[in-house]
Amino acid sequence: MLKRNENASFDLLAFFEGRTNASGVFEDRSGRIKRRFTVGLVGIASGNTLMLDEDFLFDDGERQHRTWSLTRGDSQNFTGTCEDAVSVAHGRFDSGRAYLVSELRLAVGSRMIAMTFDDVFYETGDGTVLNRSTVSKWGIRLGQVLIIFRKS
């Protein structure tokens, strides 16, 4: 079991330990929903690190898999890496929420494009976490991802 961050009222890494289910949408910068998806997550802790496997199923039948390694730093910070990350992601805990900034390479047509994800996770207090991620490229907002995570 991952040691809880006692300095944060909401510990995102502890929340993701075990099984979690999620559903979400990607909307373009005009607010039009472009994709819907579900995600099954399994988090396994070892020391200060959480291995988080994510299995995505999109409404067009596409499947994606990503494995994050999230590591606790000092009392308010954590880092993350995954196979399609351009660099180390940086996160921090705050009062009732957590932040994570990452740059991921994603398939767009036949090309792999690096995009920045600026995530905010909000604890709702009932085993549910809401996530809003602003997606950008070269500082230009492309859209946002909205996800609701539920413990299963």
Image (cartoon, rainbow, N blue to C red):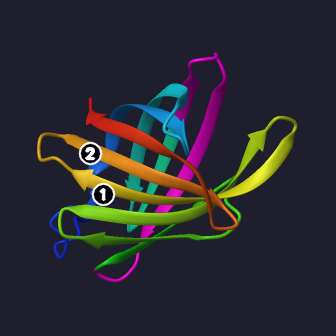
Please, is residue 77 above or below residue 25 in the view? below
Residue count near mark 2 (Cα–Cα under 10 Å), binned few <14, some 14–19, many ≥20? many
Instruction: Work out whether residue 48 or residue 151 is closer to the camera in this orientation and state it.
Output: 151
**Which residue is under mark 1?**
12
Tell me which amino acid carries mark 2: Val
User: The residue tagged with tag 2: helix, strand or loop?
Assistant: strand
**Marks 2 and 1, how far apart in space?**
9 Å
**Which residue is under mark 2?**
129
8 sits left or right of 145 in the view: left
Q: Which stretch appears magenta? A: 55-75
Q: Are marks 2 and 1 in contact (CB under 8 Å)?
A: yes
User: Which quarter shows the C terminus?
Assistant: top left
User: Which quarter shows the N terminus?
Assistant: bottom left
User: The residue tagged with tag 1: helix, strand or loop?
Assistant: helix
Which secondary structure dominates the residues rendered in magenta? strand
Residue at left offset 47%, top offset 32%: 25
134 sits left or right of 98 in the view: right
Please report whichever mark, 2 or 1, sits nearer to the chain's N-terminal start.
Answer: 1
Q: Give the residue at the far right of this rendering.
A: 110
Instruction: Work out whether residue 42 or residue 79 is closer to the camera in this orientation and state it.
Output: 79
Residue count near mark 1 (Cα–Cα under 10 Å), binned few <14, some 14–19, many ≥20? many
Q: Residue 151: horizontal and vertical position, in percent?
A: 25, 35
Residue 65 picture quarter: top right
Q: Residue 99: horizontal and vertical position, in percent?
A: 38, 65
Is residue 17 at least partly visible in the picture? no
Tell me which amino acid carries mark 1: Leu
